[in-house]
């Protein structure tokens, strides 16, 4: 990635942060609002976006599937379901048990989607998407059923399930940010293996890479990053789908540049989306998850159309 392209990405991130800090009726005039409300929310959006962008780049690389994304694969739904059950069980968000449960939900849902897609004998793009949609739909229905039967706490949890950055707990933000940073560092330490995996399992094997071992490792990194993002912002989709495709035009296909660029791009995209949701219909807010769905669903349909044309 050239210097000018790197500066472009950093400029987009800086612009998103400034937009987020200024978004609201008071603009820049109220320092207390900026420091106590908007700044923590901006930091949360940066962390969640970075985690989802990182996870999307890892999933797309290791599965060699341009349609892979934590939301589409069911990873986010698994993490959200585990988080909701923890909330209802009275487990604090800062508890290690909470983070372990959310990670287990993310990894379990991802592995289930992958296993269902492999039942056909060949891991195709369509099979993986259908498996992920099925797993996500089942987990979402399970969460809604649980919330319906727990009305006393369901109202606040519905906002979490929809995906939003309304309340930011400093402890959760700090732990989640550390998890995302650690997952990113671990993935970057194995960027050559990720490049080999993107060539296909057979080619990776001939290059001295164990495809099954690397697949599990990158699943762990991606699921850890996703679960940490979900712990802060709930279910927010399509960041991990869109960002790797967009930044790949700047970085090229190599994971050495693509992975950190996807994290930065995801941070910029979600920060801008959250700020836009606060600005569209004041004083009401549109959740960041809704804003991303409005932008991401058409992008996903375009990718489906593009892939279908390429295979015909």
Image: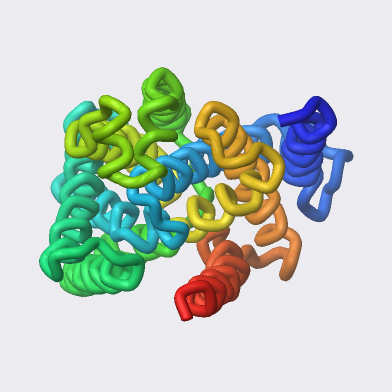
Between 205 and 142, the one lying in front of the other is: 205
Between 33 and 206, the one lying in front of the other is: 206
Side of 14 relative to 256 (left or right): right
Query: Residue at 42% of width from left, 29% of height from top?
Result: 180
Between 308 and 103, the one lying in front of the other is: 308
Side of 45 relative to 224 (left or right): right
Q: Position of residue 134 (x, y in %)?
A: 23, 73
Q: Is residue 82 above or below residue 44?
A: below
Query: Residue at 43% of width from left, 26% of height from top?
Result: 191
Between 284 and 271, the one lying in front of the other is: 271
Q: Position of residue 129 (x, y in %)?
A: 33, 68
Query: Residue at 46% of width from left, 58% of height from top?
Result: 66
Residue at the far right: name it: 29
Q: Quadrant of the N terminus?
A: top right
Q: Position of residue 102 (x, y in %)?
A: 24, 42
Query: Residue at 82% of width from left, 38% of height from top?
Result: 30
């Amino acid at each position: 990635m050239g210097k000018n392209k790197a500066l472009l990405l950093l400029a987009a991130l800086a612009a998103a942060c400034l937009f987020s800090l200024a978004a609201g009726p008071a603009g820049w005039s109220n320092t207390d609002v900026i420091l106590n409300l908007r700044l923590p929310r901006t930091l949360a959006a940066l962390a969640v976006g970075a985690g989802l962008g990182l996870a999307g780049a890892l999933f797309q690389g290791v599965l060699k599937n341009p349609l892979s994304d934590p939301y589409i694969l069911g990873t986010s739904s698994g993490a959200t379901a585990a988080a909701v059950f923890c909330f209802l069980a009275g487990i604090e968000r800062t508890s290690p048990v909470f983070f372990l449960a959310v990670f287990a939900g993310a990894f379990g849902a991802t592995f289930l989607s992958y296993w269902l897609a492999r039942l056909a004998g060949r891991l195709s793009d369509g099979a993986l998407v259908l498996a992920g949609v099925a797993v996500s739909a089942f987990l979402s229905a399970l969460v809604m059923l649980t919330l319906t039967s727990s009305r006393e706490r369901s109202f606040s949890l519905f906002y979490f399930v929809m995906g939003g950055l309304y309340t930011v707990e400093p402890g959760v933000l700090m732990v989640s940010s550390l998890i995302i940073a650690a997952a990113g560092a671990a993935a970057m330490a194995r960027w050559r293996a990720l490049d080999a995996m993107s060539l296909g399992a057979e080619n990776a094997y001939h290059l001295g890479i164990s495809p099954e071992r690397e697949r599990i490792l990158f699943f762990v990194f991606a699921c850890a990053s996703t679960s940490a993002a979900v712990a802060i912002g709930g279910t927010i989709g399509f960041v991990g789908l869109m960002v790797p495709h967009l930044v790949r035009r700047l970085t090229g296909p190599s994971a050495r540049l693509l992975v950190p660029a996807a994290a930065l791009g995801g941070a910029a995209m979600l920060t801008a989306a959250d700020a836009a949701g606060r600005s569209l219909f004041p004083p009401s807010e549109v959740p960041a998850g809704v804003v991303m769905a409005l932008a991401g669903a058409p992008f996903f349909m375009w990718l489906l159309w593009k892939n279908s044309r390429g295979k015909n």
